[in-house]
Image: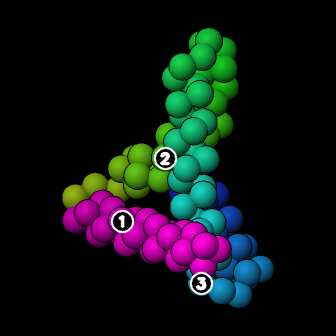
């Protein structure tokens, strides 16, 4: 279910924002948001932890690991790494453009 929700969100973003760079940036932001929520959940009281773990997954790699295995998992993880490299490239390019 988690992967379907993230895929639908990315599809909506791809349709709204016509530039591919916006999709890569949004993908990176989703992963960062999930990791922040995971950290907050692990370092607060158990009620908050239970609430966050019930609704949100840990990160995109944890979603990939949960729903796939073997060669498919390796391919999806390399795709994730490629998307994160593109995310860093576009963020770095935006930073240099602002200087």
Reply above or below: 27 against 18. above
Residue at image position (58%, 25%) is: 41
Magenta part of the protein: which range? Answer: 71-99
Residue that badge 1 annotates:
81
- The answer to if 67 sits in the magenta stretch is no
Q: Is residue 24 visible from the viewing direction of this image?
A: no
Q: Position of residue 94 (x, y in %)?
A: 59, 74
What is the distance, in whole Å, between disc 1 and disc 2 at their CAs?
13 Å
Say few, some or many: other residues with alpha carbon within 10 Å of mark 3 (under 14 / 14 to 19 / 20 or more).
Answer: few
| Closest to the observer, 86 or 69 | 86
Q: Position of residue 11 (x, y in %)?
A: 66, 74
Mark 1–mark 2 CB contact (< 8 Å): no
Quarter of the rendering occupied by the C terminus: bottom right
Q: Nearer the viewer, mark 3 or mark 2?
A: 3
Is residue 75 placed above or below 1 in the rendered structure?
below
Residue under numbered circle 2: 59
């Amino acid at each position: 279910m988690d992967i379907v929700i993230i895929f639908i969100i990315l599809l909506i973003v791809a349709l709204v924002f016509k530039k591919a760079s916006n999709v890569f940036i949004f993908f990176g932001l989703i992963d960062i948001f999930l990791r922040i929520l995971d950290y907050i959940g692990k370092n607060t009281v158990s009620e908050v932890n239970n609430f966050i773990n019930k609704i949100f997954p840990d990160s995109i790699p944890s979603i990939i690991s949960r729903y796939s295995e073997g060669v498919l998992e390796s391919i999806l993880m390399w795709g994730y790494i490629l998307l994160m490299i593109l995310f860093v490239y576009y963020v770095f390019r935006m930073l240099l453009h602002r200087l």
